[in-house]
Image: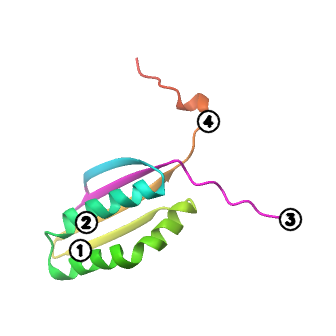
Amino acid sequence: MSHRTPSEPLRFLCECHVNERRLTAFNAHGTDEALRWFKATLMMVAISMDDEPYREARHWIEHGQAEAARELSGGKSHTLTLKQRTTQATWTVTPMPHLPATQQADTSM
């Protein structure tokens, strides 16, 4: 008997919080788009941080993306937190479940 891997969610909620306040959010369509958002916002914030959190951000860009892609493709969330003195910046990408077509309909008035 073979086991099917759940298909990748079509959408991901991407968020960046600084000191628990949401700085930005984005709805990504697919893993690649979510990771592009993650890299871009990560470097926009990390560039203004001290050397150590900046190095952590560069390490994620150079070595952490493969693990993030595996987690997201497997339906799991991915989070990275950088800390500098009293500042904490957290990036999270969360899969959003695929809704049946009847639930995707626009309900705005």
Check contact, mark 2 vs mark 1: CB within 8 A. Answer: yes
User: Does the magenta segment cover residue 52?
Assistant: no
Disc 2 to disc 1, C-alpha distance:
6 Å
The one of 66 and 88 positioned closer to us in this rendering = 66
| Type of the residue with mark 2 | Ala
Residue 33 image offset from top left, x and y in percent = 41, 54
Which label's residue is closer to the chain start, 1 or 4?
1
Check contact, mark 3 vs mark 1: CB within 8 A. Answer: no
Disc number lying in front (3 or 1): 3
What element does badge 2 sit on? Answer: strand
Disc 1 to disc 4, C-alpha distance:
40 Å
Check the picture and name the quadrant holding the N terminus. Answer: bottom right
In the depicted structure, whether residue 79 falls above or below residue 85: above
What element does badge 4 sit on? Answer: loop
Q: Which residue is mark 2?
A: 89
The one of 39 and 92 positioned closer to us in this rendering = 39
Q: Which residues are magenta?
A: 1-21
User: Does the magenta segment cover residue 11?
Assistant: yes
Disc 3 to disc 1, C-alpha distance:
47 Å
In the depicted structure, whether residue 70 falls above or below residue 25: below
In the depicted structure, whether residue 63 falls above or below residue 73: below
Residue 9 image offset from top left, x and y in percent = 55, 51
Check contact, mark 3 vs mark 2: CB within 8 A. Answer: no
| Type of the residue with mark 4 | Pro
Disc 3 to disc 2, C-alpha distance:
45 Å
Residue 8 image offset from top left, x and y in percent = 58, 54
Q: Which residue is mark 4?
A: 100
Check contact, mark 3 vs mark 4: CB within 8 A. Answer: no
Q: Which residue is mark 3?
A: 1
Tag 3: Cα neighbours inside 10 Å, few (<14), some, or many (≥20)? few
- Which quadrant would residue 56 be assigned to in this image? bottom left
